[in-house]
Image (cartoon, grey):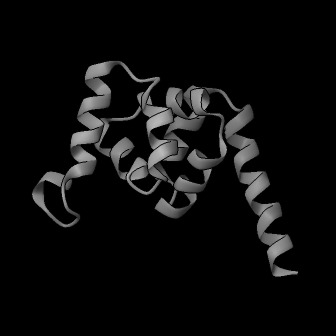
Amino acid sequence: MAQLAELSDRATLVGVFEDGELDATVPVLQHLVLPAATVVVESLESERAARMLRQMDPASAALILGRVDTQRREEILSSFPVGDAAEVRELISYPADTAGSL
């Protein structure tokens, strides 16, 4: 039963980001707790996720994308401008709890 409730909540959460205007949903995504933001990015179509993440500062995008499966991350980053994707990849590459990762 708990799994059904979790799936329902997940579908509702993702639905908000699938259908909402980017100007309204990007700030909300930035303020979600990291696990919830990760679920959203993993669940959206790659192009939609990329459009949302490109509107964030690179550090915020890297924080979320650093928790996403590598293949999925690269799928999303392939829609970024080359320089922006490189910056996000660099930020992700820093070990957690170091100045570079902040």
Above or below: residue 101 compared with residue 82: below
Residue occupying the point 50% across, 30% down: 50
Residue 20 x/y as whole percent: 70, 32
Q: Quadrant of residue 91?
A: top left
Residue 94 x/y as whole percent: 18, 54
Residue 95 x/y as whole percent: 19, 61
Above or below: residue 7 compared with residue 42: below
Q: Is residue 17 left or right of residue 83?
A: right
Q: Quadrant of residue 87?
A: top left
Q: Nearer the viewer, residue 23 or 52?
A: 52
Q: Is residue 71 left or right of residue 86?
A: right
Above or below: residue 47 compared with residue 49: above
Residue 16 x/y as whole percent: 72, 42
Q: Residue furthest bottom?
A: 1
Residue occupying the point 49% across, 34% down: 76
Q: Which image quadrant: the N terminus? A: bottom right
Residue 55 visible to the viewer: no
Residue occupying the point 77% across, 62% down: 9
Q: Which image quadrant: the C terminus? A: bottom left
Q: Is residue 51 left or right of residue 61?
A: right
Q: Is residue 7 left or right of residue 49?
A: right
Q: Nearer the viewer, residue 24 or 70?
A: 70
Q: Nearer the viewer, residue 74 or 29?
A: 74
